[in-house]
Image (cartoon, helix red, strand yellow):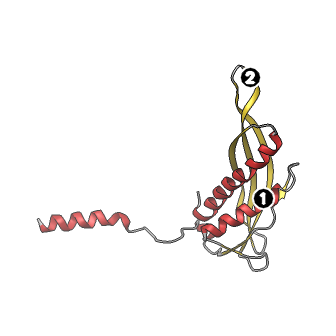
Amino acid sequence: MKIFCALLLAFSLGGCAGYRIGPVKPYYLRSVHSLAVPVVKNNTYLPRVSVLITNSIIKQFQQDGTYRITGKDDADAVLVAEIDRVDRGPVRSVRGNVLATVEFNLVIRLRYTLLDRKGAVLSSPQLIYGTTTFFVGDDITSDERQALPIAAEELAVRLVSQLSEGW
């Protein structure tokens, strides 16, 4: 009976043998400890959206704590990113009038590459999306402007999750 209990205990604890406590970075980023995040390039016609997204990304990296944010000269890697597009599409229309929209979906698409300090590519170009929905009031432009920070925050969460955890 004692042998059976000992074997049962050994098999039940054997599943935790490869578990590590603390940040688990992707293997190809094992030597990266500090990161530079220059201002994101804006390929859209929306003004000031690049600074909004850059600030969201930096805040999310600081909150995550896996990488230290520094200047370009001191960083182990540089995050080069550009906003490809910002799309707005109808989600819900007014009952009885399919041409009038009540709710829109806002999508921000960002393409990024991670470079080491010498300029060599650490990660191939990747696409990240940030989405949100917003209801239409009297002014659709101001409603969209108020929804942009929410989509930028979701985009930053996805980007930081992919670089710090690998998914």
**Circle on res. 98:** 2
- Please state the horizontal and vertical placement of residue 60, each as a whole percent of the image: 66, 64
Residue 19 placement, left or right of 69: left
The structure residue drawn at horizontal position 76% and vertical position 75%, both measured from the top left corner, is 117
Q: Secondary structure at mark 2?
A: strand
Q: Secondary structure at mark 1?
A: helix
Q: Mark yes or no: residue 30 visible.
A: yes
Q: Is residue 68 above or below residue 137?
A: below
Alpha-carbon span between mark 2 and mark 1: 33 Å
**Circle on res. 52:** 1
Q: Is residue 106 above or below residue 33?
A: above
Question: Where on the picture, by quarter, is residue 15?
Answer: bottom left
Question: Where on the picture, by quarter, is residue 38?
Answer: bottom right
Q: Mark yes or no: residue 128 visible.
A: no
Query: Which quarter of the figure is the C terminus placed in?
Result: bottom right
Mark 1 residue type: Leu
